[in-house]
Image (cartoon, grey):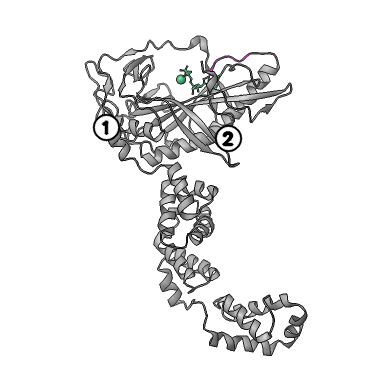
Amino acid sequence: MYKESRETEKKNLVQGSTGDWEVVIGLEVHAQVTSNAKLFSGSSTQFGGEPNDHVSLVDAAMPGMLPVINEACVHQAIRTGLGLRAKINNRSVFDRKNYFYPDLPQGYQISQFKHPIVGEGDVVLDLKDGTSVTIGIERLHLEQDAGKSNHDLHPKHSVVDLNRSGVALMEIVSYPDMRSAEEAKAYVTKLRTILRYLGTCDGNMDEGSMRADVNVSVRRPGDPWGTRTETKNVNSIRFIGQAIEYEINRQIDVLEDGGTIDQETLLFDPKKGETRPMRSKEEAHDYRYFPDPDLLPLEFDDELVEKLRGELPELPDEKKDRFMSDYGLSPYDAEILIAARPSADYFEKVAKGRDAKLAVNWVMGDLSGHANAKGVPLHEVGVSPDQLGQLIELITDGTISGKIAKDVLEIVLEEGGNPADIVEAKGLKQMSDTGELETIVDDIITNNPKQVEQLKTKPKTIGWFVGQVMQKTKGKANPQAVNKLLQDKLEIGEG
Ligand code: ADP
Ligand code: MG
């Protein structure tokens, strides 16, 4: 049971027909460790491949085989713990979690129970409304993944694929600190970003690299914790949100009808958008955990932890702060850019040593527009940071206007090439040469006496003249130079 200290302020209350309800959510996220080999064997962890291609005698649980811990997986767990600002336990213990399942040939899963490798930490969420909340992490432990049973490949038989059997997972358990589906989705999104920055899990939920057990309960504000249900193995952020919304409504309906919530294990059906029972508490397993006699306790010294700490990359929160102070980004823009490391790197390459405001505008504006239209991330849109940077330099030094720059960007996207060369070859340079512009301005004034007359009473119509000059010069005239010329010639004050 969780202590009073886990109480957060009452908010995001849900209105039922008999009063308000508070929603309580805690997540257990399974994240596949990025490593070449499995947790206790040398088999490949590659996704795909023919069934049972990546299976050693250890993974198939042949009698007499002994597990040997993969050091790389241990390092990944420590790095993840550091990224979650968590306590690293120098001594942890692998236990056997016993249960029978056809895709679990050992008859038990090697996991960590009483003594996990990582203890308490936290994840900070910056929410859309500008507020932030801190979600507590209870623990992170290492465990083996199971194989996969398939029941519809053969008309009469079920088949088992052990490729995933023995792959290292990190189970990251949150405290019940979330109070809405929005917060839960933001939590998983942020956790995935952190893991991807660290390179400890690829976060590809559609390949099963990350999946969540979703615990939901409701209670009257101020009441003790309600009974929770646990929806197993939800494999997309959208589904996590849907499963939570469904459970909130279902539980409130049951309670308001005078019923009680059973502590059940549920499955989410994405087609129906509903949860349904998988097994009830009465059938709950007694796993008979006990320390695995084949494995010594896992021990390492602080030196290793400090070495790994020293090698950590800049993490999302740090990068966000730095982007805001170095480049004057708004929290909103910074949040979008840091969400994925490649887009953050892209932006930084464009902005470094250049006009940061222009860089933000172009990356968040035109470039993001093109990226969205193509359905690809920023860095894959087909414009390199160098190309965009050069374009920005051409604007900064007055060679081209922002308007022409948009055209140049289109050309870069379609045909490739250097912005400077394109501007040169297509004659797109901004005309700032007063002599040349003067001839054009004089022409327009002579040919449009009516408009000149009108301008005397309506100074705003100077815009029409600017437009004419732009048309004549195909947008290449420097707008400031044109304005100045017109004001001088027509003897009017600043428009
Ligand atoms: P178990 O070990 O049986 O899975 P835990 O107490 O470790 O149970 O909790 C598992 C998850 O359930 C944690 O993420 C925790 O935050 C969440 N949780 C616990 N109690 C509640 C509750 N009343 N409502 C919602 N989530 C809860
Ligand atoms: Mg659990």
- Using residue 415 as the reference point, say whether residue 296 is left or right of it: left
Instruction: Locate residue 395 relative to residue 145 in the image: left or right.
Output: right
Q: Residues within 10 Å of mark 1 (few under 14, many from 20)?
A: few
SS for dot 1: helix
Q: Range of the magenta residues?
A: 258-265
Residue pictured at 65% horizontal, 81% vertical? 487
Q: Can I make out residue 106 in this image? A: yes
Q: What's the amino acid at mark 1?
A: Leu
Q: Is residue 23 magenta?
A: no
Camera sees residue 377: no
Q: Earlier in the sequence, mark 1 or mark 2?
A: 2
Question: What is the number of callouts on the image?
Answer: 2
Task: Give residue 332's position: percent from left, percent from top.
Answer: 55, 48
Q: CA distance from mark 1 to mark 2?
A: 37 Å
What residue is pinned by disc 2?
A: 182
Q: Circle 1 sits on which residue?
A: 304
* Residue at 38 percent of width and 31 percent of height: 81
> Could you tell me the amino acid type at mark 2?
Glu
Location of residue 436 in the rendering, given as x and y in whole percent from the top left corner:
54, 87
The x and y percentages for residue 85 are 41, 33
Residue 259 counted in the magenta span: yes
Residue 268 locus on image (x, y percent): 54, 26
